[in-house]
């Protein structure tokens, strides 16, 4: 009887141990084998410049140029005693530095620059800024250097001018404003005289080209309702001038006073007469002289009484 009791107690203890073992151990092993999820890194937000930022000579502005969430500094330094400069010559430096102060771009101005300013813009809102350094130098010559931010580096942007067959790295002119995915350029235009005109350029890839259907517009700089415009920029025909009016070939009689109001700098120039008549003049490069323009295969000057108002 005593032996039977010992055997029953032993079996009970064995079963109690077996019953507890399989319930806890597998759960503990499963929990240990499941890794804690690692949160994914959130990419830095693309920061765009919502409006063009102008930088005057001597100023410093900050902006995120490449969308990495860190601000770079864009400055135009004015140096009066720069080594190598001529006596009393002011040098301008267009400088970009990262958030640690390291310079990533430094551009020196043209010789004898007397006015300079810059712009930072993101015309296509892709998070990469376009930068412009406009300068007036020497005898009122104009130039703008252009770049696009690409990471920590800068790629030069080109202007395909109407009189060039290759893409040049500089814009002959100043940045006057901004249009959709482009800029408005102010420049001296040499067509039937020299005038300051405005024209829109759009950016495609790395190249600025004239906006479709655009032309150099002189009406903003030389308005026809300003007496000074007529005093200094009137052209007076010396003989009948072949023109197009209302879409039809015509001619202006000798003695007609007119203003040139615009041009594509390739094949035509728009005009308005003192009487308010408008039309266009067909022009072509003067191959015979190698400079200037021809009208109906005749040098432009032959059609006007006074010398055309070319500068320089």
Image: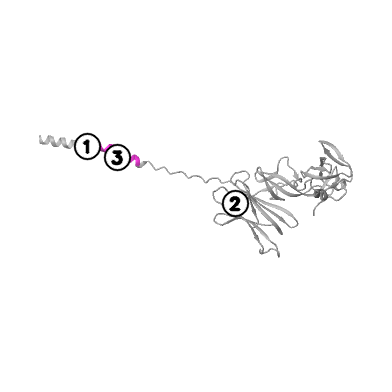
Q: Quadrant of the N terminus?
A: top left
Q: Which mark is residue 25?
A: 3
Camera-side residue of 68 and 36? 68
Q: Residues within 10 Å of mark 3 (few under 14, many from 20)?
A: few
On the image, the x and y values in percent for residue 227 come to 81, 48
Describe residue 269's horizontal placement relative to residue 110 as left or right: right
Q: Position of residue 131 (x, y in %)?
A: 64, 50
Residue 247's place in the image compared with 286, above or below, is above
Give the quarter of the image for residue 295: top right
Mark 1 to mark 3 CA distance (whole Å)? 15 Å
Q: Earlier in the sequence, mark 1 or mark 3?
A: 1
Q: Is residue 244 magenta?
A: no
Q: CA distance from mark 1 to mark 2?
A: 74 Å
Q: Residues within 10 Å of mark 2 (few under 14, many from 20)?
A: few
Q: Is residue 219 left or right of residue 257?
A: left
Q: Which residues are magenta?
A: 13-31
Mark 1 vs 2: CB contact within 8 A = no
Q: Position of residue 96 (x, y in %)?
A: 60, 54
Looking at marks 1 and 2 on the same chain, the residue that comes earlier in the sequence is marked by 1
Q: Secondary structure at mark 2?
A: strand
Q: Secondary structure at mark 3?
A: helix
Instruction: Please tell me whether residue 256 is drawn above or below residue 105 in the rendered image.
Output: above
Residue situated in front as seen by the camera: 279 or 123: 279
Among numbered discs 2 and 3, the one appearing first in the sequence: 3
> Looking at the rendering, which quadrant does residue 138 occupy?
bottom right
Residue 168: give x, y in percent of width and height.
70, 49
Residue position for label 1: 16
- Name the residue nearer the viewer: 306 or 162: 306
> Would you say residue 25 sits in the magenta stretch?
yes
Name the residue beneath numbered marker 2: 153
Position of 150 relative to 5 (above/below) = below
């Amino acid at each position: 009887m005593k032996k039977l009791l010992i055997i029953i107690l032993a079996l009970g203890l064995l079963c109690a141990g077996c019953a507890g073992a399989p319930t806890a151990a597998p759960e503990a092993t499963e929990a240990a084998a499941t890794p804690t999820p690692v949160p994914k890194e959130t990419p830095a937000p693309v920061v765009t410049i919502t409006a063009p930022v102008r930088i005057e000579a001597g100023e410093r502005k900050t902006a995120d140029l490449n969308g990495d969430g860190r601000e770079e500094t864009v400055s135009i330094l004015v140096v009066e005693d720069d080594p190598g400069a001529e006596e009393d010559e002011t040098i301008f430096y267009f400088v970009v530095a990262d958030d640690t102060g390291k310079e990533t771009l430094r551009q020196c101005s043209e010789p004898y620059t007397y006015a300079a300013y810059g712009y930072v813009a993101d015309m296509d809102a892709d998070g990469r800024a376009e930068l412009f350094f406009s300068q007036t130098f020497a005898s009122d010559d104009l130039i703008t250097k252009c770049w696009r931010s690409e990471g920590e580096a800068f790629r030069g942007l080109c202007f395909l001018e109407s009189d060039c067959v290759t893409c040049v790295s500089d814009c002959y002119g100043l940045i006057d404003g901004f249009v959709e995915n482009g800029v408005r350029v102010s420049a001296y235009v040499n067509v039937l005289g020299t005038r300051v005109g405005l024209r829109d350029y759009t950016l495609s890839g790395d190249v600025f080209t004239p906006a479709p259907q655009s032309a150099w517009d002189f009406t903003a700089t030389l308005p026809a309702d300003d007496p000074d415009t007529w005093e200094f920029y009137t052209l007076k025909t010396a003989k009948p001038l072949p023109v197009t009016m209302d879409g039809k070939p015509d001619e202006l009689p000798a003695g007609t006073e007119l203003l040139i109001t615009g041009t594509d700098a390739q094949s035509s120039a728009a005009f308005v007469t003192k009487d308010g008549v408008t039309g266009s003049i067909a022009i072509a490069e003067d191959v015979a002289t190698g400079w200037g323009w021809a009208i109906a295969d005749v040098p432009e000057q032959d059609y006007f009484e006074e010398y055309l108002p070319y500068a320089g």
